[in-house]
Structure formats: C-alpha cells, structure tokens
Amino acid sequence: MPSLENEPVPTGSIAKGAVWLETIVATLVQWVAAGLVLACIGILFSGVVGRYVFNSPLIWSDELASILFLWLAMIGSVIALKRGEHMRMTACISKLTPHKRMYFESFGILACFFYLAIILRPAYHFALDELIVTTPSLEISNLWRAAAIPCGVILMMFFCLFRLVRIGSVKVIAASTLLILAGFAIFYYCSPWFAGLGKYNLLIFFVGVAGISILAGVPIAFAFGLGTVAYLGLSTHMPLSVVIGRMDEAMSHMVLLAVPLFVFLGLLMEMTGMARAMIAFLASMLGHVRGGLSYVLVGAMYLVSGISGSKAADMAAIAPALFPEMKKTTPPGELVALLAATGAQTETIPPSLVLITIGSVTGVSIAALFTGGMLPALILGLILCALVWRRNRHVQITVTNRPKASEIFKLFFIAFPALALPFVIRAAVVEGVATATEVSTIGIVYGLVCGVLVYRQFDLKRIVPMLIDTASLSGAILLIIGAATGMAWGLTQSGFSQVVAQIMTDLNGGPHLFLFISIIVFVILGSVLEGIPAIVLFGPLLFPVARQLGINEVHYSMVVILAMGIGLFAPPLGVGYYAACAIGKVNPDEGVKPIMGYLVALVIGTLIVAFVPWISTGFLS
C-alpha cells in the first residue's frame, strides 16, 4: 500500500488523538523490532564463536533465535503495514484518478482488517494450545513463541484503523465497508452449495477471491490469506487454526532467519562505503571504453547482489554512484532498462533471498544452491555485455585519460576487503563452517570491522533506522511466505497439486518440454505475484514433478529463479521494473522500448541455462 503518512489528516480532536496514539505505538514497535534484529544477530554469532573458537556450543542459541525470529517476523509485518510497504500489485489501480484510487486504498485496508479479524480467534487458541508444550533446551512454555502471532495480528488491526483515519473520508470508508460486508454475506449465504462443487471451489476462492483481491490492490499476503480462509471456512470442515499452524511453521523456519540478516548486511555495505569501493575499482578498468560504465553496472550488480539479497537495495547502492556520469552519454531510458535487466540477471547469485526461500520450501540443499547459482548469472551477464557492446559500438565517447596501472592497483587494494566479502560468505557455507543462517552474522561482523577500521565510514545514527528498515522488509517477505504456505497447503489438500503433477508428467516432450513450460509459467507468475510468493506457492507443487522427470533439483531451481526474475523486471506488470525507474528517477515510459532487447537477451540466456544443465550443476560435488 502506498504510504499515507504524508497526506493531510482531518482536523478534530479524534483525528489528532488517533495520530498521537499511532505515533506512540509505532515508536514502541519500531524500537522493539530494532532490538529483535540486534538480538538475533548477537545470538547466532555467539553460537558460531562458541562452537568454533571456544569449542563449547550454545545448545540453546538456535532455540532462542527461533523464538525471537517469529516475533521479528510479526513485528516486522506490523511496521510494513504501518508504512504501506507490503508487496502488492498496483498496475490496475495506478491508472485511476486520485479520487477513485482512494476507494481502492480504503478497500485494501479494510480487506486486511477483516482478514486479521477472522484469524485473530484461531491465532489466540493456537497460542493457548502451545501453553502446555515445553521447549527442549530452554525448558520454557512454547507460548512465549506462539504468542507472537495473535499479538502481531492485534497490532496490525490497530494500524489498519489508523490508516483509515488518515484517509479521512467517511463516505469512502462506508462504501468500502458495505462492499466487503455484502460480499461476505453473499458468500456465507451460498456456503451450503460450495460443499458440492468439489474442485470448482478452487476457481471461486483461489482465482476469484484471491485474484480479484490482488487486482484490487490488496497486499499479496492478505489476498492469499483471504482466499485460503474463505476456502477452508466455506467449503470444507477444516478448522481455521490449521492456517495459523501453517503460518507458524513457515515463518519459524530457521533457514529464513537469513532473510533479515542479509537485508541488514546489504544496508551495512552501502553505509560503510564497501559498495562504492567496488564500483570505483571497476570504473577504473572500464570507464574509458565505449559503454564502459554500462559494463561496470553489470559487474557491480553481480558483485553486490550476492551480499545484499534485496534487489531494491542492490539497485539503490549502484545507481546513484553511476547514473550521474552515465547520463552524459546514455539516454535515461537505456540506463534504467539495463539496471532492471541486471536485477533479473543476478537473481541466482548467493546469498539471494530467493535461493534461501526456495531451499526452505522445497528441501533443496542451500549450500548446493549457493554453489550452483554463480555460473548461470555469469552466463546471463556475458549475454547482457554482448548486447551492451552492440548498442554502444558506434557511440562517440569523450576523450578520457586511461588510468595508470598504479592507480588501478591502488583502487583494487582499497576495494579488496569489499571484493573478498562474497567469497568469505560462500566459502563459509560451502565448507560447512556455518549454516546459511549463521554465515550472515559473519558477514555483518566482517562488514562492521571493514567499515570501522578500513573504510572508516560508520554513521552510528543510521544503525537504528537500518534495523527498522530490515525488520519492515523482512516482515513483508515473511508474511507472504506464511500466507502462501497456508494457501499451498489448501491447494494440496484439495487435490490440485496431484492434478498439476499429472498434467505436467503426461507431457510427451519429457524434461525439455517441462523446462520450457516452467519458464513460461514462472515468467508470468514472477510478473503477477512477484518472486517469493510465486516460489512458495508453486515450488512445492512442481519440484516433485521435476524429480520424477529426472531433472536435477539445483538445475531446476536456477531455471525457475531466472524465469521468475524476467517476469519480475518486465513491464507492464513487473514491480522490479518500476522499482528500478524510481531509484534511477526515470519515467517508466522511457525505459519500455530499450528494455525489450535486454529481455530477449535474458530469455536467450535462460534457455541456454535450461538446456545445458552443466552450467548449474558442474561445480557440485
């Protein structure tokens, strides 16, 4: 949801009181979130130090981190809702007039509120059921962990009400409320008929309810949740507490704790100047050739992407450093097109959040994914460079002095600690020194040391805002994973997964046709649902089919991720493209034509990766 924080608030004591209360609650929630991120970093790093330095493992560290992680996921979701940062599709409503958009904003907020109201009671009972369960290491009630869900739901409901106050139009809110209540009444009245519809209910709830909600601008996590609870509550006898259990299971997965930690590492890289050092070194080698800074952009995204894990953070770290100089010789539309293309190209570079997510929901080894992800992105990068060369071969460049070897060596020496970080992270995972979750804390400590001792750029005042930003982005991602996991479970129980598996298995073309269709499917899903929701929802359904056809899981993961990345950064629906335009401060219309060539190059590269499995699996032991 777009943020309403800067919009005028209606005058009056009630409105002013609501704003005052919102500020107090938001401040407390943000400080709690910052503390939770710090605590998770400290606990996990202490576990690594205790195990490898003092040979005395902290047997309770993972358990405590898991408890705090669920709280971080829910509190982060609260902050994301307050800020309007939950992922959603806005392609349809963005074309409306401001007045009409207000109705959809109100509808989206109320849809979130009603979904949260529906799951509040099941969440409360789920937490009470955990009261009698005792954790093995800490020997405390599991209620301490499970209580995070109902507490997060209540806080999100509060902020939904605050956001409605900021809209300020009683007429708009009343119209949206009546529409939702009317829809609820119709579905409730028709519920006796749903039981006899069988699999047609999937079209009604997962395509109809969830799909229309997404098109109307309801955040994706809440749209998934609405479709799931409507399906279970109106067409089955399953208790809604099942949805809460699936959310808890998905959002408590220790592998996903790497998500907030790598997000924070990416922000830390930008703050300490490590990203700028990399760019300066690359520019010294290529800045004097035709399209040289375009090559630097491709190379810099390749290096930085493996650390931050967030595409928006990657682009925000690179674009401001390169665009001012590049705009002197290159049209803005071309720049933003290349920036978006490199975002899609680098989706498989570890430790990508998508790699971590796909490993957690499909059971594929994350160490193997980290190893297999480097070469596919390199292949796509080389194809993009070939296209850059073709587009710049006739460009007249200004005469620039080629840097001396001593200057290049000096910049390399300065950038070396930053250049070494991706290899430190990957080596630690592949060699088994730390898990994919723990290695993020090693990267954070490494980044802190480099920032303070090497680059001497460390702004203490930015730490708390960075921690809060980390919690917000992580909460938005993790709530989608929780909601999509519940939806995937509902699809599985309905028999839909067996139908999909049977259709895909019966394809006469074998593995090659299956890979080709998977590329088409995930390009579409990546464009409509964004990356992580598409992976969580359809990964568990399609990976078993790939195994039956003899396709290596790591290879299939790379194909799926690259295809999804193309959809994510392809106009007119791909939100990654619009993020690139916003970061580059370029009108989206200017980049549509230039990006088409880059998308073709990315498709060619993805097909090469799909039909040459060695590119993904050649370095696996």
Image: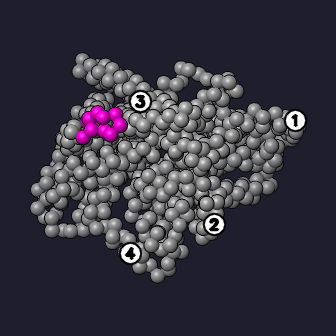
Q: Is residue 81 left or right of residue 319?
A: left
Q: Residue furthest front?
A: 55
Alpha carbon separation for disc pair 1 and 3: 46 Å
Q: Residue at x 79, y 39 (%)?
A: 284
User: Which comes sooner in the sequence, label 4 or label 2?
Assistant: 4
- Residue that numbered label 4 is attached to: 503
Residues at discs 1 and 3 in contact (Cβ within 8 Å): no
Measured as percent of width and height from the top left, residue 176 is found at: 24, 42
Structural crowding at the residue carrying mark 2, measured as other residues with C-alpha within 10 Å and reported as few (<14), some (14–19) or many (≥20): some
> Mark number for residue 406?
1
Alpha carbon separation for disc pair 1 and 2: 39 Å
Alpha carbon separation for disc pair 4 and 2: 27 Å
Instruction: State whether residue 316 is above or below residue 378.
Output: above
Q: Quadrant of the N terminus?
A: top left
- Residue that numbered label 3 is attached to: 36
Q: Residue furthest top?
A: 13
> Hey, what amino acid is under mark 2?
Trp
Chain part drawn in magenta: 133-144
